[in-house]
Each structure stands twice: as structure tokens, then as C-alpha cells.
Amino acid sequence: MEAAHPVTRPAGPAVDVVPARRVLVSVFDKTGLDRLAAGLKAAGVRVASTGGTRAALESLGLEVEDVSAITGFPEVLDGRVKTLHPHIFAGILARGDRPDDLAVLAEHGIERFDAVIVNLYAFESVIAKPDCTAAAAIELIDIGGPSLVRAAAKNHAFTAVVTSPDQYDDFLAAVARGGTTLAERRLLAARAFQHTARYDTVISAWMARHAGLAAEPAGSPAAGPPLAARFTLDLERRLPLRYGENPHQSAALYAPVGAHLGLAGLVQLCGKELSYNNLLDLDGATRLAGLFTEPAAIVVKHTNPCGAASAATAAEALATAMASDPTSAFGSIVAVNRPFDPACAEILLAPGLFVEVIAAPVFEKEAVELLTTKPTWKASVRLVEVPPGDPWEATAGMELRGVAGAILAQRPDVCCDDPAAWKVATRAAPAADLTPALAFAFTVVRRLTSNAIAVCRGTNLVGAGIGQTSRVDAVRIALEKAGERARGGVLASDAFFPFPDSIELIERAGIAAIIQPGGSKRDAEVIAAADAAGIPMVLTGRRHFRH
């Protein structure tokens, strides 16, 4: 037997203005209900409603028809079933230009609704509470509300749908002038479908966590929890940008709805508007700064650190980081992981310095005053507060990256390295006083673009080799940047040395110790070269490659 297909008939001309003669109101959020009731009463609109909304409207002096009287059936199952009835949904979905639809309404004694005013149970705010139980969350999954909203939105040619108290004033203004226009109803419908899509996304993400839904192949060697089989993001535009990486590219900053940590929660205190490239650099600077528990300052240019230091105070770290590579630091992005105080501001007031953006968890008032009144670039510098915390919670713990036509997802490389698990591979061990420098260098190198090499003196980056197609070239560039400061310092590599040729360069530069992950089939040759050069080498066993 062939499958039945719906019968289609040509539609009549689109109806423009639809008066609001009869509306259905059922709202969880009672904000603005007094304003809505007054406007509907003034316009002589007939109102039908349910339970708590009906009682609230009646207390505001509005005459209300009970939905139970319309359906001939009481609310049941503790209010789980109220509006799911043909006398309600046929009244919403009937097409005003279809005689057969209108004949069905007449046959069954059903009246049309010209508008539906509904907002949904507060599922998202409930699950955000620490003491929220699964049972409480499930009871806040709205069934009738989304159904009413979708029905009215589908039939927007004849039915208006209002889903937020923010829309009441415009809706009431339309009612007062004679009715909603087709353009207004179409816009309201679009907003309604965005609303239900967002609602379902939040529920879907919660239910996936509740059910432990995941699809990682059995026996996967990947560390950490498995990745979800399906992942839905609801993004909102937080910050329109002048352009993207280049002036001919349009761009904006989007963030998951409700996200408030990391760059999703940034607050710009002053200065010019942020650019696309500023935000990329801010990401690199704040993410590296966040890896340090001690006071640290990071200077970034074109997404890579050109200065990095940790010290007893943020100001001391900032002074050292800015001196790492003064040429590259001009026009850079600066981030510290402590409150930005006047001492930090004084560092940047030195003649000849210019920075594009300064980021910190918080800025002290006196520091803001210094930075916005003293230097020549005072009107240009952007001061940005970036809240600390786990920025990945809004993306289900995943770091996302766009490729042509798709998204790559991975667990972010944020875990701390454990020096206790490192092994000395050479006959000679590094001097004890080099341990802080080795740990610092291996932390910095993980945020450099691969192939990556970091040369450090103490807890100060003095030379970086980044984004090279061969590791020996990255070594050469890092040592050239460091110059004489390399002598007695340490060198970190984000991945293994494939050949011993880099060791020759490192020996000539006077490096005192090397730290690298290891894992090459030529590890023995590289270690032998380090032994021959008398340079201690530590293997960490963990790679931090970053494209």
C-alpha cells in the first residue's frame, strides 16, 4: 500500500492585519503581567488562561475564561496536562483563508485564537542551582508551552505568538492600532522558534549528561571522558566587530547563551573597540597566564607569547616579560593573572612602550586612572577584565575549532604537568636550581605554535622559535632571539627532537639543560648527542603540540 500524502490546496491571499479579538495567555514568568492585563482589558480582548496565570490575571481585574471550561476537561496529573486538547490547538492552527478549516471549527464549536502569549518553565535557571535534583529538573521540562508556541508560530499567517515580557509593549501597541501585521507576526514567529530551539538545546544537553550519553569507541586510548555522540550549541552574538582578520571580512564574537567565563564574560572598561585579531591574541595571553599559580605576566603578538615571566608580584613579572623582546612587545597584548594594580600600570608608562590591550581578572581604580590619563596612547588602549574560571563548561568541556564546513572538537590541553613523572634521560642530571626554569619553560612552550622552542632564564622567556616546518629551524630562531641570554639558560621543546642536529646548535649556545617530551624512534641518538655535549636532558612523556 502506498503511503498517504497530505492533501494540499492553493492558499488564498496572505492576510496582513489580524485583530486580536481572543487570546490565550499561559506564562510561567509573571513579569509585566499587570501591564499586559491592562492593555488587553483596554482593547476589549477576550482572554483564556490556565491555573496560576488565570488567577493572576483575575487578581488584576481581568475577566478570564478558564481553559478547562473550553476543553470540558480538568487539569490533571498535577498540571502536566492542561492545554493539550483539540479545542485549544484547532483554535490556534486553523487557517483563516481555508473554508474547510473554518467549517471544521464551526462543526465542533471551536473558536479561533488570534494570539498566543506563552513563556516556558524556567528549566535552565533551575538546573543551575547546586541543589537541583534530577526529579526537580524533569518536572520543569515544559510540554504544553512549547507545543502552544510552535503551533502559533507555524500558523503565524493568522496567529500572533508572544514569548517574552519584552515583547508585550510592541504587541499591545499593535492591538491598540487594530491588530498585528503579517511582518510583525513573521518576526514574532522567528523569535518563537529561536526560543523553543534554545529551550530544547538546554534540555538536550542536561539529559545527555543525566543519561551519560556518549559514543567513544571502546578501548580508545584518549585520556579524559568520552565525547558526546551529538553536541548542540546555541550561540548568541556578544560583540560585533569592525571586520575579521582583514578589512574585507565581516566578523563578530559569539558565545554560548549563558556563558560568562573566559572571553565569553569579558568586560571592556575603556579604549577603542576590540578587533578580531585582538581577541585571538587575548585568548593566547589569558590562557597561558591561567596556567600559572604564581603571579605571571604574558606578552602576546600574533597569538604567540613574545614575553612571559613569573615572579613574586604581578608588577615584577610584567616588567620582566616586557623586557624579554621589546621590539615584538610594541603593539602587543598583555595579560596578568592577578589584579592589575598601580605598580603594574607604572611599568607600562615607561617611554616608548605601546600596547593594544591589557587584560586582567580585575583592574584597581588607581591603575585605570594612570593608564587612561598618563601615556600618549591613553585613549586607544583597551582595558579588559576577563573573569577567571573554567571557560570550557559552556561547551561541554570541549575546545572547538572551525575547519571548512565542519568543527573539530577536543578536550583542551589545560592539565598541569607533573614534574615528579619526568625522567632524566642523560647521564648528568640538571642542577637543582634549574628545576623552576625547566618547569616554567615547559609551561610556556605549550602555548607556542608548533614547531615550538622556548629558551628561558629562570622564570623568564628570552627566546621563542614558533611555527616552523622543521624543529632545527625553531631551535635556531629561539637561540638567535635569546642571544647571550641563552648561555646558562634552559630550552624546552613542545615535541620530540627527530634528529640530533638541534643538539649541536644548543651546545654552541651554552644551554644548561633541555626538557622535551621524547617519543621519537631516534631518542637514543638525541640522548647520546646530549650526553656527548654534556647537556642534561629531561623527558616529560607528554607532548604539547599546538597547530
Image (cartoon, grey):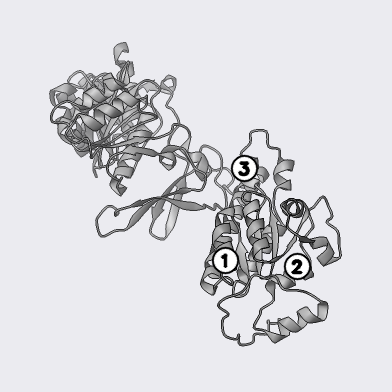
Instruction: Tell me the element at label 3.
Output: helix
Q: Is residue 291 visible?
A: yes
Q: Nearer the viewer, residue 159 or 403?
A: 159
**Location of mark 2 (residue):** 88
- Image point (86%, 59%), residue name: 74
Of badges 3 and 2, nearer the viewer stands 2
Q: Position of residue 250 (x, y in %)?
A: 32, 58
Give amino acid for label 1.
Ala
- How far apart marks 3 and 1 lie (CA) works out to 24 Å
Amino acid at dot 2: Ile
Residue 480 in percent (x, y) is at 14, 31
Task: Identify residue type, mark 3.
Answer: Ser
Considering the numbered disc 1 on the image, is that residue within a helix, a strand or a loop? helix
Q: Residues within 10 Å of mark 1 (few under 14, many from 20)?
A: many
Between residue 425 and residue 254, name the one nearer to us: 254
Tell me which numbered mark, 3 or 2, is placed earlier along the sequence: 2
